[in-house]
Image: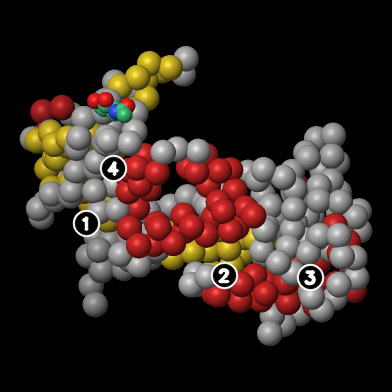
Amino acid sequence: MKMLLHQVYFLLLAAFFINHVYGNTCSQKTTTYGYVCVCNSTYCDTVPQIYVKEGTYQQYTTTSQTLGFSTSNGQIKSVSEGYSIYKIDLTNSQPKQTVFGFGGAFTGSTGFNINSLPSTAQDNLLESYFAADGIEYTLCRVPIGGTDFSLTKYTYDDNHAGDVDLKYFALQDEDLLYKIPYIIKANELSNNNLELIASVWTAPPWMKTNNDYAGIGFLKIEYYQTWANYFVKFFEEYAKKGIKFWGLTTQNEPLIGLLPTFISEINAMGYTNLQMNFYFSYKIP
Ligand SMILES: *[C@@H]1O[C@H](CO)[C@@H](O)[C@H](O)[C@H]1NC(C)=O
């Protein structure tokens, strides 16, 4: 089959903008960092829907001048190369990648801050991220235990050195108070379209060579299988709360686990390439 190569040139000039549509206008507030849009108990910005017809595009912009979800439509035009500022080649017949989703992370500190708002403001805030009149996040990350955005350093089996059967494995307050309730709400707001990916920052200190949450530390070889089972436990405990996961990454930023604590104090665990390969030879049951 003959490959169709469409060369589309965008000439990004104001004259092309045919239409400006705004969501609810930004309730502006000046801060030391510049303007922000305020979302409160009775009011929050909304995001205008997509209005693209064939041959047109729609762009959303937020800048300090056009706060809120400002959007405009324009027409895709082929112009001679001499006029183009940007050139984008689209090969419609051979898509190489599909975008699975966009999103953020349900960390302990995110939930803690959401929780500090009046409940109607919480609803407005979550709606602006997950609902149809918001930015419709569909793919979010959930930390397995503590992260660099946690209130404390913790794992799900602290203070039980040698607990290879993970008898003391338990979700913590951050999960129960600050992650799970908001994940459930967000999933409802997105009409169950939310996909979740889990990532871990550190194993319990007793499984590590440095017996600490942070600093230069690796998983001890004798705990590789326990550590694989730990992931399974996490998924089981979340499933009991009605939360299913689409994916898993086995370690957040392994290089942080090669840094001494005077450089980084965050929950971390190091892997070399070899250790990572070796770890993957362990089966997650
Ligand atoms: C919320 O923001 C709106 C828009 O700026 C404002 O009119 C209203 O008074 C605010 N409500 C509260 C409770 O602060």
Secondary structure found at label 1: strand
- The residue under the point 33% across, 36% down is 41
Residue closer to the observer: 61 or 202: 202
User: Mark 3 — residue?
Assistant: 168
Q: Is residue 5 above or below residue 13?
A: below
Residue type, label 4: Lys
Sequence order check: which comes first, mark 4 or mark 1? 1
Sequence order check: which comes first, mark 4 or mark 2? 4
Residue 87 numbered tag: 4
Sequence order check: which comes first, mark 2 or mark 1? 1
284 horizontally vs 52: left or right: right
Sequence order check: which comes first, mark 1 or mark 3? 1
Query: Are the residues at dot 4 and dot 1 in contact (C-beta closer than 8 Å)?
Result: no
User: Mark 2 — residue?
Assistant: 238
User: Mark 1 — residue?
Assistant: 6
**Alpha-carbon span between mark 2 and mark 1:** 46 Å
Residue closer to the observer: 164 or 98: 164
Crowding at dot 4, Cα within 10 Å, few <14 / some 14-19 / many 20+, comes out as few
Please identify, in this view, whether the residue under mark 2 or under mark 1 is nearer the observer. Answer: 2
Please identify, in this view, whether the residue under mark 1 or under mark 3 is nearer the observer. Answer: 3
Q: Quadrant of residue 211?
A: bottom right
Secondary structure found at label 4: strand
Crowding at dot 1, Cα within 10 Å, few <14 / some 14-19 / many 20+, comes out as few
Residue closer to the observer: 279 or 195: 195
Please identify, in this view, whether the residue under mark 4 or under mark 2 is nearer the observer. Answer: 2
Residue type, label 2: Tyr
Residue type, label 3: Tyr
| Residue 25 percent across, percent down from the top left | 21, 30
